[in-house]
Amino acid sequence: MRVVIVAENASAKLGGEAFDPLHYFRVLRSRNIEAHLVVHSRTQAELQAMYPEDCSYMHFVPDTWLHRLLWFCEQRLPRRAGEVTMGLLSHLYTQSIQRRLIHQLVREYQIDLVHEPIPLSPKYPSLMFGLGVPVIIGPLNGGMEFPPAFRSRQNYFEELTIAVGRQVSNFCNRLLPGKLRAKTLLVANERTKQSLPKGLRGTVIELVDNGVDLSVWRPVAPVPKEPNQRVRFVYVGRLVDWKAVDLLLEAFQPVAAQTDAILEIIGDGKLRQELEALSQRLGLTDSVIFTGWLSQAECAKKLQQADGMVLPSLLECGGAVVLEAMAMGLPVIATNWGGPADYLDSTCGFLIDPTSKEAFVNELTDAMIKLSLSPELRLSMGRAGLERVQKYFDWERKVDRILEIYQETCAEKPTQCIGSGRAI
C-alpha cells in the first residue's frame, strides 16, 4: 500500500484539526507503510525535527506572497467569516499546488490512493480529483451552529457570511468536484452526513474523526489527596469567544468559594487579557491560574496533576482534548453540543445542556462542586473514561480501521454506487 496524505497543515503546535494528518502519517510510517505527506511549508521545520528519518516522505508547498496576503486579510475578519472567505481561497490556492505535486508522486512512486483528512468541513470544495488513483476524504465533522440560546455570541456579519457560503457551497463543489468524485467519504456523525454536498458518487462511511495517542496521554496511579490539598480543575484550549471561558469563570466563582478548588487555564488567544481581567473582577486571583500555551507533553503532565477537565465550548465539532483527559483517567465536564456529546456519557463525566446562559453556568457550577466533594466519583468516572477511550478512540485502532477502508476503496469497482459495501 502506497498512500499520499494531503492536508493544508500537519502539526502538533497548530493543534486542532492539524493533528489529524500528523497522526495518520505518524502511525502509518511506524508500521512501515509507504505514506507520503504533502502539506504547506509553514510546518516544515516542526515535522522534520519530529520525524527526521521520514524526511524523504514529506513534501512541502512553498509559502508565497499570495499566501501571506490572504492570511493578512483573513486575520482582519471575524473568525468564521475569515475562514469561509480568505481562508478558503488560501486553501484552494495551496491545493492547486498540491495537486500538481501529487500527480508527480503518483507517477514516481506508483501511489495506490490519496487521503485528504482535513479540512473537516463537509462544505469545503476539494481539488483532489483526476489524480489517476482513488481518493478518500475525511473523516469530516461539521454542519454546526451555536446553540439557539447563544446565537447572540455570533455577530451579524459573520452569520450572514456563513449563511451565504453554505448556500453557494453546492455550486462550488460542482465547480471543484473533489468531494463529488471521491471514491470514499468518511463522516464523524449523522449531522455531518446531512451537510455533505449533493450529487456524491462515492461510498459514505461513518468513522469518528478524533483519536488519542496513548503513548503520550497515559494515566498515572491516583494518589489520595492530603486533607489540605486543593482539588484542581483544568481547561485546555484557545482563549476565543466560542470556547466560553468567560462563562466557565463565572461558574467557578461559587466553586472556589465553597470548596477552595483551583482552576488552571492552559492555552492562549486574543481574549486572554480580557479573561484575566474578568478573573480579577470575580475575585478569583488566588484560585485561577493562566498558564498559557503548552506542548502536548507539557499538557499531559498538567493533566496528570489535575482532578477534572472542563470544556464549556459552544461550537466544538470535535474536542480531542476531551478524549485526552479521559485517557489520563480524568472525569470531564463538557457542553452537550457537538463533538463532546459523541465522546462522553454519564459514566465518565457530565454533559451540560446549553439551554440558557443562567442554567448553563449553574449546571457547570454544580458539576464542579460534585466532583470537588467526591474523590470516589472522580475515581469511578476517570476509570470509565479511560476504558471508553481504550475501546473506541485509540489512534492505533483507528488506523486499523483506516487501513481496512483503504483496502476496500482500492478494491471497489469504478461503477460501484453509493449504498454498497459498508456505506451508511
Image (cartoon, rainbow, N blue to C red):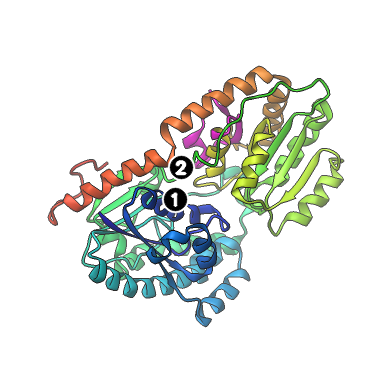
- 293 lies left or right of 123: right
Residue 221 on the magenta span:
no
Amino acid type, residue under disc 2 in the picture: Gly
- 83 lies left or right of 78: left
Secondary element under disc 2, as helix, strand or loop, is loop
Front residue of 195/155: it is 195
Q: Earlier in the sequence, mark 2 or mark 1?
A: 1
Q: Distance between the residues labelled 2 and 1?
A: 9 Å
Q: Name the residue under label 1.
A: 23
Where residue 362 appears, as percent x and y from the top left, is 71, 31
Instruction: Say if residue 252 shows up in the picture.
Output: yes
* Extent of the magenta region: 327-350
Instruction: Say if residue 130 shows up in the picture.
Output: no
Residue 329 on the magenta span:
yes
Q: Name the residue under label 2.
A: 211
Residue 396 versus residue 98 in the image, above or below: above
Front residue of 36/181: it is 36
Residue 16 versus residue 70 in the image, above or below: above
